[in-house]
Image (spheres, rainbow, N blue to C red):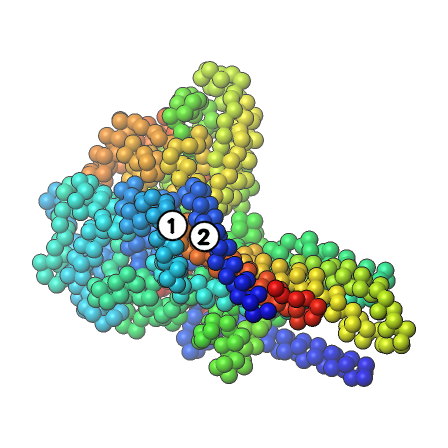
Amino acid sequence: MKKKYFSIVISLIVVLTLALTGCAGGSSSKSSSNAGKTLVFGRGADATSLDPAVVTDGESFRVTQNIFDTLVSYDYSKQSTSVKPSLATSWNITNGGKTYTFTLKKGIKFQDGTAFNAQAVVFNFERWMNGKKSGKFAYFPSMFGGYKGDAGLVIKSVTAPNATTVVFNLKRPSAPFLKNLAMSPFAISSPAAIKKYGAKYGTTAAVGTGAYVFKSWKHNDTITLEKSKDYWKKGLPKISKLIFKVIPDNSSRLNALKNGEIDLMDGVNPSDVAGVSGNKQYNVYYRPPMNIAYLGFNVTMKPFNNTKVRQALNMAVDKQSIIKAFYNGQAQAAVNPMPPSLLGYDKAIKPYAFDVKAAKKLLAQAGYPHGFSTTLYTMANPRDYMPEPQNVAQSIQSTFGKVGVKVKIVTVEWSSYITKLTKGGAPMYLMGWTGDNGDPDNFLYTLLDKDSIGSNNFSFYQNSKLHNVLIAAQTETNTAKRVALYDKAQVILHNDAPWVPLVYGKPVLVGKSTITGYKPSPTGTEPFDTLNVK
Amino acid sequence: MLSYSIKRLLMLVPVLLGMTIIVFSIIHAIPGNPAQTILGTKATPEAIHHLNASLGLDKPLYVQYFTYLKDVLTGNLGTSIQDNNAIASEIWPHLAATIELSFAAMLIAVIIGVNAGIISAWKKNSVVDYIAMIVALIGVSMPIFWLGLLEQWIFSVKLNWLPSIGQTDITSTVAPITNLYLVDTLLEGQFGQFWMVVRHLIMPAVALATIPMAIIARMTRSSMLEVLGSDYIRTAKAKGQRMGWIVYKYALKNAFIPILTVIGLQTGLMLGGAILTETIFGWPGIGLYVYNAIQARDYPVIQSGILIIAFMFIMVNFIVDLLYGLIDPRIKYR
């Protein structure tokens, strides 16, 4: 009897082991099979909607970039934010910068078979402009100044004189206008699909003119797209199936890449980069920086209402050590409140050097020879521009301690953190910003103008001189004059020091070395149409 | 027994009602605003204001509560404010994923845990006993995220035996019937796919099983020790019964009540979402679903999610209570 049990157990073990090893490797994504290539992109979180007009998160745009096209597009092949034709083949700017006339490409169809034309463009803009009641289209009022009925809305009218011409009449010239049109949220959806699906548009359907067609969505798991058979760019896309897979943990996402289950991923822990960068099986990509991480002061609170205190603390942060320790060396020390890739970045400004003695001296002049005690707020969640916020806070705490400023660190979960900062409850805080359209206005005006108090100016910094310069720059269409205005703005900000600009981060991606033609865009997301797998 | 069951089920009503009040109060007390979170830092204050109004979040709290309660009572779990989907249809695939994972983990935990505990008690103070209890101690104190990553590194990256993440291979899909993939693949007669689902289950289930396994082993040992010392066992031994027979047939039955209690509690906890395991293994379960909703301040999803979890917890313990009677006929239900 005993023997019988024993032999059953042994044979079970043998069968299980054989089965396990026999199926080994069966899970790898078959990215190079002849039936059509598949690419699996691993990422930390799911999209919220596939209607690009209603979302603001990068994870949604990463998908919609591949389903939709915009009127004009960023130059993704050069990893730049300069604008080039897309659905519109050309445009004329007349009437002192107040009239934009776009000529659309002929013969393009939406993925549901309906025609793409000027009426479709007008329909989409009307939909967004009339969003006031629903409050749904968050990005639209942020970039175009408001909804219909708001004084700030820069668009006076959008009309379609014929099927291939769209005319925008603006209330005033707007320098960032073209760049705004290239942003993912302003991609053109099929009007027929929007009408057909109503409130379900974006969850059960998403129809554009892009390289891939939306197939299925398993929430918090996978989104599957398939090659659009009649995509208007000949010969593209190169991949037949595109899958976005959610794997929340950075380390297990990397394990999945190493096991061949995914092909490309973002959100690599800075400390894990060294492990893959020397390996021939993988490519490591760095996004050109279009972001900034900073330490902000609430300038309405004592002692940060004193400019000298803010300048002194600018000298008490060791940016190089922070970059070395928490960015794996892959970031650039920040000088101005906007990254160097942007138009009008002022190279002439010299950064405040890390100098404990000078900082102490300046603090003494400001009336704080023995320093003071304060609180530094930081977010609990890692961000693209700051993968390890709590460690950065501790580094600042230690160098501030050397100049006599005692810092207590308070960590707050992201959603509560935003509420806290918007209400002005934090004397010092860590924060950052990823640019939307590659325009300097999207950094300086959005983050530091007095108009932005209550939204993104968490420092409550007000300066009328700066305000006048920034408003003038918004409507200035002559590039040289515009650059001169932004130079002026950056000098004011450097001297007033409402922030300590910390770093311009370069988010890291890792992919299998069989991937070719992948160029990460500074905007944070890019279409995968030219990407290929060997 | 029937009247007892009905009484227990009726008691569910005030408990769940109390749950809705507690959850509703807590989530509205924490800072953070759903409109702000949905629209992100890019939104203008006007846009946030309009979205708040269209979501009904500007109404008095008691009005919001009763609107929600009305939804629940009509069998409608509400609509997610983040993605506009009906929660009732969205929550089931997540819950099914968690049920499957918890069931697999519990199976491992019970089979190994109970047997380890029995052997430990049977061979008290022997090497086997010490090894089993040291392993149990390690199991109970090992962080799951560390164990999960270690499993992935060994069995996926190094040995390439098992898939590291997900419920299925990323490139293959299971046609959902019940959303319990083990069941669905069998119903479809897809044995290849069934095996694939099993392979995906192994590592997360083992990771999730370690802590309950250790707790069950220790509970079984102490409970068995008590029973093995009793008179009727000595009598059975004196009558010349085989020891294995005595242990599994007579002793275990009497020792099983406290073990069953622990199994019930642990199962309930697992169904509440194995958030760490789900995070490491990219497992789209209920824990992750509710966690994401908390991050986004998606009030209806948090409320309904916690309500469902509470309901599952209570049901598991109810089933355990009924099982007591099956194991020990002396237990009477009133």
Give, as a three-letter code, the residue at label 2: Thr
Residue A77 visible from this viewpoint: no
- Look at the numbered disc 2 and give the secondary structure of its residue: helix
Q: Is residue A285 left or right of residue A469?
A: right
Screen quadrant of the C terminus of chain B:
bottom right
Q: Mark 2 points at which residue?
A: B20
Q: Which residue lies furthest to the left in this view?
A: A161
Q: Where is residue A320 in the image (x, y as percent from the top left)?
A: 51, 37
For residue B65, the mark is 1
Q: Position of residue B221 (x, y in %)?
A: 77, 61
State whether residue B332 is above or below residue B63.
below
- Look at the numbered disc 1 and give the secondary structure of its residue: helix
Q: Where is residue B244 in the image (x, y as percent from the top left)?
A: 81, 74
Give, as a three-letter code, the residue at label 1: Tyr
Q: Mark 2 lies on which chain?
A: B
Q: Mark 1 lies on which chain?
A: B
Comparing A425 with A377, the one in front is: A425
Q: Position of residue B260 (x, y in %)?
A: 67, 64
Comparing A424 with A234, the one in front is: A424
Label 2 to label 1, Cα distance in Å? 9 Å
Screen quadrant of the N terminus of chain B:
bottom right
Q: In this view, does B302 lie to the left or right of A272?
A: left
Q: Are marks 2 and 1 on the same chain?
A: yes
Question: Considering only order in the chain, which callout, 1 or 2, is on the residue closer to the N terminus?
Answer: 2
Residue drawn at x 45%, y 61% is A220
Residue B314 visible from this viewpoint: yes
Q: How crowded is mark 1: few (under 14 residues within 10 Å), some or many (20 or more)?
A: some
Q: How crowded is mark 2: few (under 14 residues within 10 Å), some or many (20 or more)?
A: many
State whether residue B77 is above or below residue A174.
below
For residue A464, the mark is none
Q: Are marks 2 and 1 in contact (CB under 8 Å)?
A: yes
Report which quarter residue A6 is drawn in: bottom right
